[in-house]
Image (cartoon, rainbow, N blue to C red):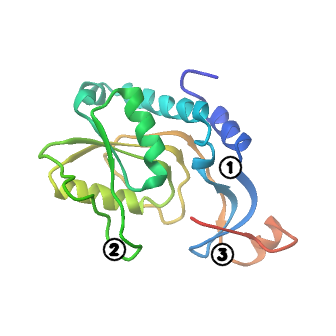
Amino acid sequence: MHLIPTQEEVIQLLRSTGALREGHFLYTNGMHSNQYLQVPLAFRYYQHAKTLSVGLSRLLRANAEIRAMIPELSIVTPDAGGLPVAFGVCEALRAKQVYWAEKANENQPLRFRQFLEQHPGEKVVLVDDILRTGKKLTELKALLESNGAKVVALAVIVYQPGPDILPFEGLPFYYMAKMDPMYFSEGPLCDLTHPQGEPVKVWI
C-alpha cells in the first residue's frame, strides 16, 4: 500500500471490512441508493484505522500553511462517528488537542460540553468519517466561528456527496476517496437496482 493510499486501495479496504456494501438501500431520509457506507466498520481494526488516519494527516501536512499551525491546531468533529478519525489524525500530526460537539437530541443544535470553550483565533481542522450533505459540519463551523475560532481546513475519510450537499467554498478540503453512489426516489430505478425483495433499511 502507498504512503498515502490510493482511491482504489481505500475502496478495497472499505469493502474488505464490510464498511462498503453494494445493493439496494433505503436511507432514513427516504432516499434509495445502490451503496451503503459505514466507515466505523473499517475503524474497528487498529491497523486499518491507522492507515486511513495517517494517510489523511499526510494530505493535511502537505499544505505548508497548515503544517506551520500544527503545534496549535485543534482537531474537532461534529459527532461520535468522527472521533476515531479525529484522534488518529491528531496523533499522526502531533496536533494540540481533540474535542467534539454533540446534541442533547436531534431537535436541538450542536453544543460543546460545559467548560469547553474556544479561545479567540484558535485554529481548527474539521474532521469526520464521511461527508454526504455537510449539514453537521456546516453547523459545527458556524458554532466554532461564533466563539472566535478560525476553521482552516476540512478533512474526511470519504467524500460521498449527496444531491443536497452544502458548499464549503474557499476552505481547503481533503479526503482519502471520493464515491459517487446513485440516489433515487422510489420508482423504476428500484426495480433495476434490486429486482427482487425489499431494500435494506439503513441509517444515514
- Viewer-proximal residue, 109 or 8? 109
- Residue at 56% x, 64% y is 204
Position of the N terminus, as image quadrant, is top right
Q: Earlier in the sequence, mark 2 or mark 1?
A: 1
As measured in the structure, the alpha-carbon distance from the residue carrying label 2 to the one carrying label 1 is: 30 Å
Q: Secondary structure at mark 3?
A: loop
Residue under the point 31% across and 70% down: 109
Q: Are marks 3 and 1 in contact (CB under 8 Å)?
A: no
> Which residue is the site of mark 2?
108
The CA span between labels 3 and 1 is: 21 Å
Foreground tag (2 vs 1): 2
Residue furthest out toward the left: 120
Residue at the far right in the pictured view: 196
Which amino acid type corresponds to the residue marked 3 in the rendered image? Ser
Dot label at residue 185: 3
Question: Does residue 6 appear left or right of residue 149 in this picture?
Answer: right
34 in relation to 97, above or below: below
| Residue 191 image position (x, y, % from top left) | 82, 72
Mark 1 residue element = strand
Which residue bears the numbered disc 1? Answer: 20
Q: Residue furthest front?
A: 114
Disc 1 marks a residue whose amino acid type is: Leu
Considering depth in this image, is 162 or 125 the residue closer to the camera?
A: 125
